[in-house]
Amino acid sequence: MNKADARAVYEQYWLHARHVELEMWLFNSFYAVLVGGVAAVLSADIQGITIAIKVIVAVLAFVISLLGFLLTYSLRIPFLKFILLAELIAINELGLKESYRRFFKKGKKNFPGDKRIDIHDILSSLYALFAGLMAYVATSLYFNDFLHNWALILGTAISTTLLYSHFGYIRPKIYIKGIADAMAQQVKK
């Protein structure tokens, strides 16, 4: 591949990676506004905001938290794929110097999975915890604190299940079995 074609392909992969990253941050901005609105509605003692409305708002926040959890997972894989491919093209076709490499350093790989925690872990954890909190709030409001302990158990179970699925299944699947090792074999220089 000549340098002009390699540069065009590199640019496209880089732009795809940035697009995926921007999708994630756009949803997170929407989610931050939603959390503020949910907190305002749930804490309001305004006439007209009934318990039923608060339950509906908490259930909606629960569903959107689950969507955020799944969205973070579904956008993580294409982001890693595009950013790693862009760096491979820069190394193999454009001669990227060792000092500018982020993931593929000589003799070792430095992938996001090598870090203890990254932004996707933080976001997934926040979505999982907020989903559990909203399940607790919706259940305790709906049953008028009659099943307070069961609501707490439900919220804790949902958060724990989501956190375990992320750190016990999703994260190792991406990093240990996935993209990074396959791409490390493609480094020529």
Image (cartoon, grey):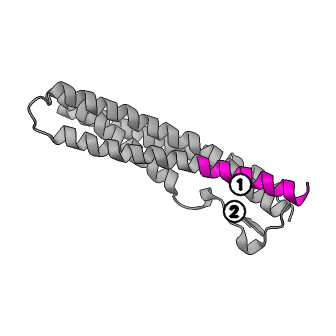
Instruction: Answer whether residue 15 is magenta in the image.
Output: yes
Residue 103 bears which disc, if any?
A: 2
Under circle 1, the secondary element is helix
Position of 130 relative to 112 (above/below): above
Q: Check disc 1 and report the residue beneath it.
A: 84
| Residue at left offset 50%, top offset 55% | 119
What amino acid is found at the position of numbered circle 1 in the picture?
A: Leu
| Residue at left offset 78%, top offset 57% | 88
Give coordinates of residue 130: x percent, y percent: 34, 42
Give coordinates of residue 29: x percent, y percent: 41, 48
| Residue at left offset 27%, top offset 42% | 37
> Can residue 103 be seen from the camera position used here?
yes
Instruction: Answer whether residue 164 is magenta in the image.
Output: no
Q: Locate residue 112: give its quadrant.
A: bottom right
Left or right: residue 92 versus residue 50 is: right
**Residue closest to the eye, 105 or 165:** 105
Q: Quadrant of the C terminus?
A: bottom right
Position of 52 relative to 119 (above/below): above
Position of 150 relative to 2 (above/below): above
Q: CA distance from mark 1 to mark 2?
A: 7 Å
| Residue at left offset 73%, top offset 50% | 12
**Residue closest to the eye, 27 or 178:** 27
Which segment is the magenta one? 1-19
